[in-house]
Image: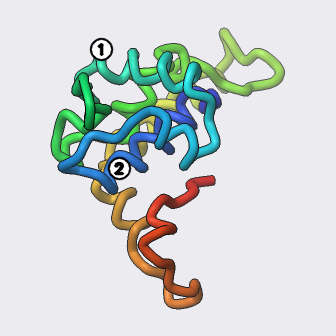
């Protein structure tokens, strides 16, 4: 299974949104915080909005917010919203179609999909926002974080 760059960026930016739960965040802020072009984010957020993961607010002070509680958004939801083909993609070489090995690979893909479905945005948020004792504390000016 391959995660597309679109799915990777969608996870990164939705995770960034999770740190601003009650306030809209502009695409310009997200683009700068995650080093992604605004035009690429517009495409991603159109798909996320279509699947009700995010909602937009117009006007001054507008931007994007999560549309559901962190516990109700799974990583699989984000991936499926932006990249429908990802669930079906594999990096199997050679092609195992029609063999017993094909059944094994299909089962593995189901397990991976199930695992991504079991991880909530709340869990991922807590992993990336819990201060690490080995890292120096950041100031308020460094409130955005980078997700690799």
> What's the image's color scheme?
rainbow
Residue 23 x/y as whole percent: 23, 46
Which dot marks residue 119? 2
Seen in the image, is 46 located left or right of residue 50? right
Identity of the residue drawn at 42% across and 49% down: 16
| Name of the residue lying farthest toward the right | 94
Give the vertical position of 48 relative to 118 (above or below): above
Please tell me whether mark 2 sits on a helix, a strand or a loop: loop
- 146 or 141, which lies in front? 141
Tag in front: 1 or 2 = 1
Quadrant housing the N terminus: top right
**Image quadrant of residue 117?**
top left
Q: Is residue 112 visible?
A: no
Identity of the residue drawn at 48% across and 20% down: 42
Residue 11 x/y as whole percent: 47, 40
Residue 96 x/y as whole percent: 72, 18
Identity of the residue drawn at 55% across and 38% down: 31
Query: Residues under labels 1 and 2: Cα distance?
Result: 21 Å
- 121 or 40, which lies in front? 40
Q: Residues within 10 Å of mark 2 (few under 14, many from 20)?
A: some
Q: Which residue is mark 1?
A: 50
Identity of the residue drawn at 31% across and 32% down: 63
| Name of the residue lying farthest toward the bottom | 133
Q: Counting residues from the N terminus, which is met first, the one under dot 1 or under dot 2?
A: 1
Residue 50 x/y as whole percent: 30, 14
Give the vertical position of 1 relative to 143 (above or below): above
Which dot marks residue 90? none
- 131 or 32, which lies in front? 32
Give the vertical position of 102 relative to 9 (above or below): above
């Amino acid at each position: 299974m391959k995660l597309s760059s679109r799915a990777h960026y969608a996870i990164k930016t939705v995770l960034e949104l999770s740190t601003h739960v009650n306030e809209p965040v502009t695409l310009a802020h997200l683009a700068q915080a995650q080093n992604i072009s605004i035009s690429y984010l517009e495409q991603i957020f159109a798909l996320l909005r279509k699947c009700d993961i995010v909602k937009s607010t117009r006007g001054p002070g507008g931007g994007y917010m999560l549309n559901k509680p962190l516990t109700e958004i799974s990583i699989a939801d984000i991936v499926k919203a932006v990249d429908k083909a990802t669930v079906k993609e594999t990096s199997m070489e050679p092609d195992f179609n029609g063999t017993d090995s094909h059944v094994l690979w299909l089962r593995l893909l189901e397990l991976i999909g199930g695992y991504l479905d079991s991880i909530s945005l709340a869990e991922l948020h807590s992993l990336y926002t819990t201060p690490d004792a080995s890292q120096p504390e950041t100031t308020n000016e460094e409130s955005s974080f980078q997700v690799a």
